Every structure is written in structure tokens, then in C-alpha cells.
Amino acid sequence: MIELSKAEFDVLDALWINYPATASQIIERLSDDKQWHEKTIKTLLGRLVKKGALTFEKDGRQYIYMPCIERADYTLKESQNFIERFFSGRIAPLVSGFAKSEQLSQQDINELKKVIDDWEKNQK
Amino acid sequence: MIELSKAEFDVLDALWINYPATASQIIERLSDDKQWHEKTIKTLLGRLVKKGALTFEKDGRQYIYMPCIERADYTLKESQNFIERFFSGRIAPLVSGFAKSEQLSQQDINELKKVIDDWEKNQK
DNA sequence: AATTATAGATTACAAGCGTAGTCTTAAGTT
DNA sequence: AACTTAAGACTACGCTTGTAATCTATAATT
């Protein structure tokens, strides 16, 4: 699997919002949350290309970037990894930890119920 | 919050199994899973002490190590962090991703139901 | 008491990461 | 056509991390 650093992920995440996109557009999107220099983001784009996480096409002297991987796929793999490391691969202890420390809202509970519901419907 | 690298976490995790413990005991515990040189583990122990994740008492020429943080606390914070980064702080999308990719077993579902159940009892 | 072994302290070193600055070249402007 | 931007390429640099090897001092052994 492609391994991304935090900063690399954040750049890719800005691309996932809407793509294809140019470097300037990505820089623009990131400017709200991060205080990153334009050069920093370009370095990260280069590293992402090198890692195979995104490609580009030339358009004049700009590049038009596109992700090579999907967000859902990436986050699923990271989630598996995370849960394996910290909870021996079981998901309930993670949720249980949140519950115990009062981190769950009624909305979270409703959403979780729906996930369970859908899962059960799918089993039939 | 104390930030631990993967390798550091693994060492601390071996201590959490049972503590206080000496370096040799920790090395012994890790020998099953990891091919780490004894020196490597000692380096990591030193870094953990420096980061404030564990302390020790002297006993002759050995150190007896003890964690300064609890596993549940650490994993909770890491979980929050993780869910914030990848799922905007909401837990259901993570579980939903697992469900969609057939990663959930009936046992997981039962455990999740129990967590929800307990949560609801607690609300009353 | 002298010697040896070993625990921890210190040092090492390459790769990855965050964070840019400088260089080069082609596109845009006059 | 000449000049100026600005996009991407290349270089930089200190910090962390993984992964030990060497140094030092003290406990154990002879």
C-alpha cells in the first residue's frame, strides 16, 4: 500500500474535494486551514506523484492533477491498520472507548444503528 | 499529548502487558513478534523515558520500568485524532466503511450492539 | 582483589518528513 | 523579438525514526 505522511494526506485530501485540479487550486483550498507556503505544497505534490498517489497531465505550463487512489479505499486501509495496531483488529473496543469517555452523541448512536441495520439487511 | 512512534508504542505495549518490568522482560516479550536487537529496544526504552511515557526505579544495575500513561487513555486519544483526520470526527463513517467492504463479522455486530445498548442504558 | 560480563549511556547513520529557497525554462506580455 | 513571470525541478536542512554499535561503569564471578 502507498504510505502517505500527514502533510501529504492533507494535500491529497484537498484534491479529493474536486478533481482534476491545478496546483493553484489546491493551494487555494488549503489556504483556509493551513499556513503552508506555496512551495511546501508543491513539494508535497511532487512527493505524491513520486509515490504514485496522483498523476497529472500537462496543460501549457501547468499540471492538472488527479488522484490515483480513492479516498474511501485509502481510509479503509488506514482504518484497518489502526484498529489492528491498537485494538487487535476488533472495532467494538474502539467504539466502546468513545462511549466510556462520553464521546458519543445521540446522532453517532443513530448513525451506528443504521450501519448495523443495513449490515443485517444485507445478510438476509 | 505525548507523541509516540510506532516502534515506541510497541515497546510500551509490551510493558502494558504486565508492569513493572525490567528491560530483559520487555525484550523477552517482544522477541515473539519482532526481530529487534536488544540494543534497539533499549534505545526505544530510553526515548520513551525521555518523552515521559514511562519511568523507572533502579534495582541494582537494572531498571524497573513503569508506564506513566494508561493504554486506554493513549488509544482513546489516538482514536479521536484518527477519526478527526479521516472522518471529520464522526465515528459511524469508519464503521460504515468496514461494513461496506465486508470487514464486519457477526461477532463485531453483536459487540457493537452491546456498546450501543450500554450507552443507552447509561442515558436514562 | 582482579577480572569479566552486562546494564544502561552515548554515539551513529541513513531514510523520511516538514518546511521552504533557488534554479530553469517555457508561457505570457509589451 | 525581448523581457518578465511564474510553474515546476532541484536543492537544502534540521528533526524524527528505525536500527543498532560502541563506550562506561558497576555488579557478579573467580
Image (tube, coloured by chain):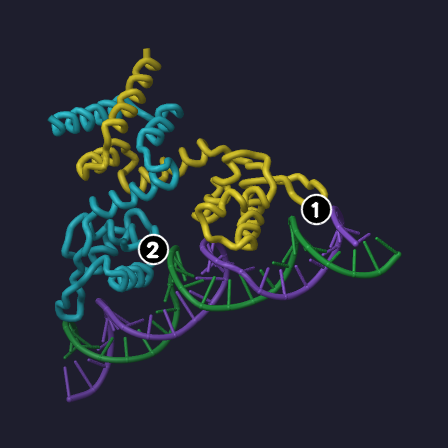
Chain colours: A yellow, B cyan, C purple, D green
Three-letter code for the amino acid on which mark 2 is drawn: Trp
Disc sitting over residue B121 in the figure = none
Q: Are marks 2 and 1 on the same chain?
A: no
The chain letter for the residue carrying disc 2 is B
Which residue: 40% across, 25% down?
Answer: B101
Give the residue furthest to the top.
A124
Tell me: B13 left or right of D27. right
Residue B106, quarter of picture: top left
Which residue: 50% across, 40% down?
Answer: A14
Which residue: 70% across, 40% down?
Answer: A59
Which residue: 57% across, 42% down?
Answer: A25
Q: Position of residue A33 (x, y in %)?
A: 44, 46
Image height of A113 relative to B41, above or below: above
Q: Position of residue B108 (x, y in %)?
A: 26, 26
Identify which residue, B118 or C8, lies in the foreground. Answer: B118
To which residue does mark 2 refer? Answer: B36
Image height of B86 relative to A122, above or below: below
Q: Are marks 2 and 1 in contact (CB under 8 Å)?
A: no
Three-letter code for the amino acid on which mark 1 is drawn: Arg
Q: Nearer the viewer, mark 2 or mark 1?
A: 1
To which residue does mark 1 refer? Answer: A61
Image quadrant where one finds the C terminus of chain B: top left
The chain letter for the residue carrying disc 1 is A
Q: Position of residue D7 (x, y in %)?
A: 65, 48
Identify which residue, A67 or B45, lies in the foreground. Answer: A67
Q: Secondary structure at mark 1?
A: loop
Q: Secondary structure at mark 2?
A: loop
Q: Position of residue C17 (x, y in %)?
A: 46, 53
Cα–Cα span, label 2 and label 1 = 49 Å
Identify which residue, D20 or B122, lies in the foreground. Answer: B122
- How many C-alpha atoms fall within 10 Å of the one at disc 2: few (<14), some, or many (≥20)? few
Image height of B113 relative to B37, above or below: above
